[in-house]
């Protein structure tokens, strides 16, 4: 115990070396810029800068990559709030409320909320990184195929929550997303499905392309359409970014809930920040005292989403560091960085000489959050200029970013075509009142659920009882039921409360 | 005058370094890697590129073109300009099985071998709590209980599925292959006891060595790093080497001079003590082969895919 405390203290001393401070500042700034550019995801940013860290000390390199990761996850919220275009998939849910707030002239408050929620989400996630890393890693190890099936079903029940207006249209959107998720090579038999001879569809539709199309390109199309009908109004914001004590008190419980959700989702392999933001958002909505604000610019919604996605960062490091299982694409890249430094992920990162480096990285991860808060709050005004741009500049700029971003993923033109197709799908979906977020959610969760179900049944020779074979399965089943019924139950409670008043 | 002499010396030196080979790249070299940044292939490629840059005299820029089980990157490589400024890493036998399966529009002779970089031998694994302590026990159980044992693979007809099929066919038992999306998930399933055994490559298990038992190696001789583990051949099963290799190739049409230049440069890089230390740290099993031997390896792997692998699925 005393030894561990010594390691922790040493870690902080090492992390405060000027070179590490420099790595944090540079990493966070680069991360935020990458994050707020639509199409440049956190994974891409970390991967692009990975080679830069080869010549650095292991701890400095990891701190820099961690800073880019955290910065990018927060940075995604800036463009989500200001131009309704999540800079990274992790901010997809932030776009819902954040952009509504911008339309109401509360862009500053939305950005402040996002920054503060990200800070606390990230900072709190460090607690689990420090204390529960080995323990929580073991829980994730127990997730087998049946558990993954239920995890994806649980995720899909969120669709009922994200599509508040019409459940039927929400389910239609989800079904469309599930259908699109079947494109590509069948995960079990290797049969080509709906590929039409395109080898680039072999691994399915690239979710990043689909996201850019559904959220960004369709937005540009809608903007262009509105421009023809009416003059676009320039979004101005002069409101304070800092939250009042009252406002902070309102979002504090939301941050707490999102922290737990984000942390758990981060720890579970396969589920990343893009799912956590929706779960955090949905939970914030269910527990909110001001449900009427949701869909019309609720800062609780922004906080729920942003605290959850930043809480993923610390959580996702846990299985990667303790078990060598990356929880999502960014940590996969981080693991590559670790291995290049000659460090093998696993329990041995916590003993001997390597423990020194691990705890320096942990301490760095704590300090990164403070830099993110500082740079985020100070720099937001600069980024806010994006939203003040007139539509005449914004539409082509968004289009260019969409094209460049989707091309940059694989340097492949097919991705641009896919992005454009999804842009049109997203634009039509908006017109028909379908829900783009539900489409994306189903697109991400579909393959996880399909693999989980089919693999489970293969393992059990077709006996469906395997799906209820472990206590974790039952817990997840219960969560699914709660997830499905929650909108109904919540509506009832809300109705009752109104009547009593 | 002094400046003039220095300038002359610089020019002379430049000429000398160029004249050592008939060919040298005039701009940065693009290196295509058909897997994601951070993947195993990418990591090993980056380690080598770092040390090869010095020998080549230009920066090696890694371009990750992942997807389609490697076919997207290799299609790009086969269509790249053959001016010597684009080279790439190919994974064997995946490149060959892609061609046999009809992924991508390239053929085996669309690539000119430069040299081999890495060789990884496949291993038969069980979890550390498995009741099987030897491969013989596992095979005996499998024969008594046909179709009962389950093996995780990294995908339908993927490299590690081929490995477990080779074992099963040569030992004469039936089992159930459960495809997992990739090697990480495949090995997780083994550690979670969702499956009974698995075939994977040596570098894949470096991080989980303490959680698995290695029952056999797909090699002709015992491996120096695993002297107590028998080869499959010793036990009377599949008696040839099986694993994966990563070779460096150039697109068809690249000049002979360029190939020879890269062959020498990569050889020097792989012999660099600093590279050797870095590769050891990263768990890379370097296995340099010259262009001629690499060509033989590629052809042998192609034959293997056409003749042996195709038979496995019948």
Image (tube, grey):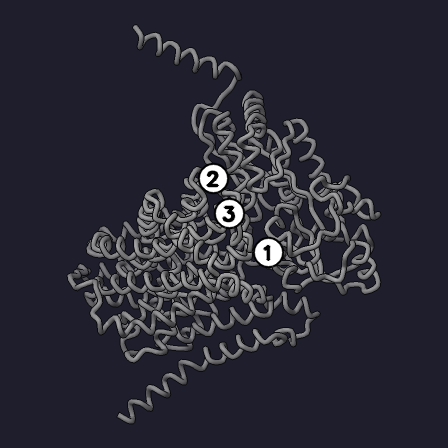
Q: Which residue is mark 1?
A: A192
Badge 2 density bin: few <14, some 14–19, many ≥20, Cα 10 Å: some
When the figure is inspected, residue A26 is found, relative to residue A421, above or below; the finding is: above
Q: Secondary structure at mark 1?
A: strand
Nearer to us: label 2 or label 3:
3
Label placed on residue B63: 2
Foreground residue, A386 or A42? A42
Residue B64 spot, x, y in % from top left:
49, 42
The structure residue drawn at horizontal position 61% and vertical position 74%, both measured from the top left corner, is A470
A22 left or right, relative to B102: left
Q: Secondary structure at mark 2?
A: strand
The structure residue drawn at horizontal position 78% and vertical position 46%, both measured from the top left corner, is B230
Q: CA distance from mark 1 to mark 2?
A: 27 Å
View extreme (front): residue: A2
View extreme (left): residue: A238
Badge 1 density bin: few <14, some 14–19, many ≥20, Cα 10 Å: some
């Amino acid at each position: 115990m005393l030894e561990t405390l010594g390691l922790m203290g040493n870690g902080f001393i090492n992390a405060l070396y000027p070179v590490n401070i420099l790595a944090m500042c540079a990493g966070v700034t680069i991360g935020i810029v990458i994050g707020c550019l639509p199409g440049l995801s956190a994974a891409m940013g970390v991967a692009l800068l990975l080679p830069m860290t080869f010549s650095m000390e292991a701890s400095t390199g990891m701190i820099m990559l961690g800073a880019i990761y955290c910065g990018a996850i927060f940075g995604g919220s800036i463009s989500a709030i200001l131009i309704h275009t999540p800079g990274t998939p992790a901010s997809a849910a932030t776009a819902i409320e954040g952009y509504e707030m911008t339309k109401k002239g509360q862009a500053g408050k939305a950005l402040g909320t996002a920054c503060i929620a990200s800070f606390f989400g990230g900072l709190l996630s460090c607690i689990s990184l420090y204390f529960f890393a080995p323990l929580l890693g073991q829980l994730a190890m127990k997730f087998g195929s049946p558990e993954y099936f239920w995890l994806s079903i649980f995720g899909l029940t969120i669709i009922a929550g994200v599509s508040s207006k019409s459940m039927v249209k929400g389910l239609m959107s989800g079904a469309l997303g599930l259908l699109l998720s079947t494109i590509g090579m069948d995960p079990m038999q290797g049969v080509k499905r709906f590929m039409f001879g395109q080898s680039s569809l072999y691994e399915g539709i690239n979710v990043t392309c689909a996201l850019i199309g559904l959220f960004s390109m369709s937005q540009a199309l809608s903007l262009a359409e509105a421009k023809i009908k009416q003059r676009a109004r320039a979004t101005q914001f002069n409101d304070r970014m800092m939250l009042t004590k009252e406002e902070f008190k309102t979002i504090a419980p939301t941050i707490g809930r999102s922290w737990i959700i984000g942390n758990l989702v981060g720890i579970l392999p396969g589920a990343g920040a893009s799912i956590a933001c929706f779960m955090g958002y949905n939970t914030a909505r269910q527990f909110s005292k001001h449900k009427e604000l949701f869909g019309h610019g609720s800062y609780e919604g922004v906080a729920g989403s942003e605290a959850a996605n930043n809480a993923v960062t610390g959580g996702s490091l846990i299985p990667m560091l303790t078990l060598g299982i990356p929880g999502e694409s960014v940590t996969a890249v981080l693991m590559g960085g670790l291995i290049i430094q000659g460090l093998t992920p696993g329990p041995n990162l916590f003993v001997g000489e390597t423990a020194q480096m691990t705890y320096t990285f942990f301490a760095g991860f704590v300090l990164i959050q403070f830099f993110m808060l500082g740079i985020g709050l100070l720099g937001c005004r600069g980024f806010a200029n994006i939203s003040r741009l007139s539509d005449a500049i914004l539409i082509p700029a968004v289009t260019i970013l969409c094209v460049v971003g989707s091309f940059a993923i694989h340097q492949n033109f097919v991705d641009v075509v896919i992005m454009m197709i999804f842009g049109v799908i997203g634009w039509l979906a908006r017109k028909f009142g379908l829900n783009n977020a539900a489409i994306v959610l189903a697109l991400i969760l579909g393959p996880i659920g399909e693999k989980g179900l089919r693999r489970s049944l293969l393992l059990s020779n077709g006996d469906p009882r395997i799906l209820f074979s472990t206590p974790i399965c039952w817990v997840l089943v219960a969560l699914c039921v709660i997830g499905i019924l929650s909108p109904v139950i919540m509506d009832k409670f809300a109705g009752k409360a109104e009547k009593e008043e | 005058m002094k400046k003039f002499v220095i300038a002359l010396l610089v020019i002379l030196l430049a000429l000398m370094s160029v004249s050592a080979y008939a060919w040298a790249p005039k701009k940065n070299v693009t290196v295509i890697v058909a897997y994601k940044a951070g993947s195993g292939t990418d990591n090993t490629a980056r380690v080598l590129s770092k040390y090869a840059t010095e020998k080549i005299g230009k920066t090696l820029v890694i371009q990750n073109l992942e997807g389609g089980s490697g076919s997207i990157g290799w299609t790009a490589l086969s269509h790249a300009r053959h001016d010597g400024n684009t080279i790439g890493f190919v994974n064997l036998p995946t490149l060959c099985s892609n061609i046999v399966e009809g992924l991508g529009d390239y053929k085996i002779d669309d690539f000119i071998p430069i040299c081999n970089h890495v060789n990884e031998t496949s291993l038969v694994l069980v979890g550390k709590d498995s009741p099987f302590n030897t491969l013989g026990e596992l095979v005996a159980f499998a024969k008594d209980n046909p179709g009962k044992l389950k093996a995780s693979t990294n995908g339908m007809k993927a490299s590690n599925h081929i490995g477990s099929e080779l074992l099963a066919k040569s030992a004469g038992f039936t089992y159930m292959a459960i495809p997992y999306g990739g090697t990480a998930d495949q090995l997780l399933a083994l550690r979670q006891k969702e499956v009974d055994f698995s075939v994977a490559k040596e570098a894949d298990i470096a991080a989980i060595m303490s959680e698995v038992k290695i029952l056999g190696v797909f090699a002709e001789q015992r491996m120096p790093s695993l002297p107590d583990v028998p080869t499959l051949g010793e036990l009377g099963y599949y008696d040839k080497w099986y694993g994966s290799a990563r070779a460096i190739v150039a697109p068809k049409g690249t000049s002979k001079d360029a190939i020879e230049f890269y062959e020498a440069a990569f050889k020097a890089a792989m012999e660099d003590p600093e590279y050797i230390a870095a590769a050891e740290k990263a768990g890379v099993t370097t296995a340099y082969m010259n262009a001629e031997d690499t060509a033989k390896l590629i052809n042998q792997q192609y034959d293997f895919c056409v003749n042996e692998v195709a038979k496995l699925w019948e």
